[in-house]
Image (cartoon, rainbow, N blue to C red):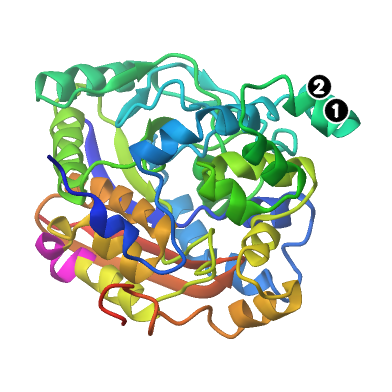
Amino acid sequence: MTDLSEFDDIPGTTLFTAQRSRKGYWLNQFCMSLMKAENRERFKGDERAYLDEWPMTEAQKQAVLARDYNACIAEGGNIYFLAKIFATDGKSYQYAAGTMTGMTQEEYAEMMLAGGRSIEGVRSIKEGR
Amino acid sequence: MARISAGVTSSHVPAIAAAWDQGRADDDYWRPIFAGFEWSKRWIAENMPDVVVLVYNDHASAFSLELIPTFAIGCADRFEIADEGYGPRPVPAVEGHADLAWHIAQSTILDEFDMTIINKLDVDHGLTVPLTLMFGQPEAWPTKIIPVPVNVVQYPPPTGNRCFLLGQAIRRAVESYPEDLNVHVWGTGGMSHQLQGPRAGLINREFDTAFLDRLTTDPEALRKMAHIEYVREAGSEAIELVMWLVMRGALGEHAKELYRFYHVPTSNTALGHIVLEPTS
């Protein structure tokens, strides 16, 4: 049996393993539907009604409505799929990534301009490095 | 006979597409990024390939969770530009080279790589951003493109070693094609970046520099790098760098670095770009 447990050892990082893909299947498929302009319009017209057309869990729907991308990822979402939501909102990857860090958009942008987040201390939960 | 004359890699950050398409390429933020490709644009104009085998990953554009090919090859004559949620990019459609693509598909499959053959494929920023960086905004792209999408979204992606071996198989395929064609192999994506979770914004310049160095000094070491090392050291989305090893495998044992560009930040990403020439 392949041991993928080390993939869960990186602080603040969720890798899209089989288990998460299965959990997030309909959340991610809903996201895919937003690649069509007419679906983006329908979603923007009534987000809740559009979400209710999908066999998603209530937690997944709430995460989408709140644009809580960390919650979306916890519910099995993958960032490249979730990108269809923030694209529909006219937002960028930098915006969405920033919202997941607990920093303000300005703080996040400043950190990137200063060279990005340092690797020191965020390599491993288990080893505390 | 067809021959592989160069390898090119580049990050494919979607914000580059947005900046270019919206006329912001000359802004202070973006100018140094596009300037980093000026040498490459001049170089490629003088060494224009007939065909580029372009290794990239689809970002949930052509492939949803319904179908996730590990290695695939676009065998059509033409590929349309995907609508990724903002409307399709205003760039030319991509012209394929169906005859060489089918030849590579047949050759690599008989060489024991189980490629997925694609006849309809809308290409996303993973493929079009490197074209913009290398060619600007022509009315038609000046070379034919064979898209080779690699899964790096769903775990597990192929190993770096498997990517390298695929590159070697692509080289054997190209060199057995009877027509005299100048072929490039491009690897795209990377370098260090993480787009998700509280660790988003991670950049590891030391890792990236060593990776760029090793493409010429020690590709064997890169072949052995495990997935966990990419993602731990360089961010969850840095796993895209395995695709650079398809390019490197296609160049043969020895390669010379002609040009390198590295820039932080490009949105959330460390942009890396290298031009290599096979010397063996």
Q: Which mark is residue A38?
A: 2
Q: Is residue B216 magenta?
A: yes
Which residue is at a point 65% across and 72% down the rendered structure image?
A: A102
Real-space Cα separation, disc 1 to disc 2, in angstroms: 5 Å
Which residue is at a point 10% across and 60% down the rendered structure image?
A: B220
Does B232 sit above or below residue B103? Answer: below
> Where residue B54 appears, x then y in whole percent?
39, 39
- Marker count (numbered): 2
Which residue is at a point 25% across and 54% down the rendered structure image?
A: A5
Is B93 placed left or right of A37 in the picture?
A: left
Dot 2 alpha-carbon crowd within 10 angstroms: few under 14, some 14 to 19, many 20 or more: few
Which residues are the magenta region?
A: B215-221
Q: Is residue A68 magenta?
A: no
Work out which quarter of the rendered image holds the N terminus of chain B and state it: top left
What is the three-letter code of the residue carrying label 2? Glu
| Dot 1: element | helix
Which residue is at a point 25% across and 23% down the rendered structure image?
A: B115
Q: Are marks 1 and 2 in contact (CB under 8 Å)?
A: yes
Q: Which mark is residue A110?
A: none
> Where residue B255 appears, x then y in whole percent?
18, 60
Q: Which mark is residue A41?
A: 1
* Quarter of image, res B106: top left
Disc 2 sits on a residue from what chain?
A
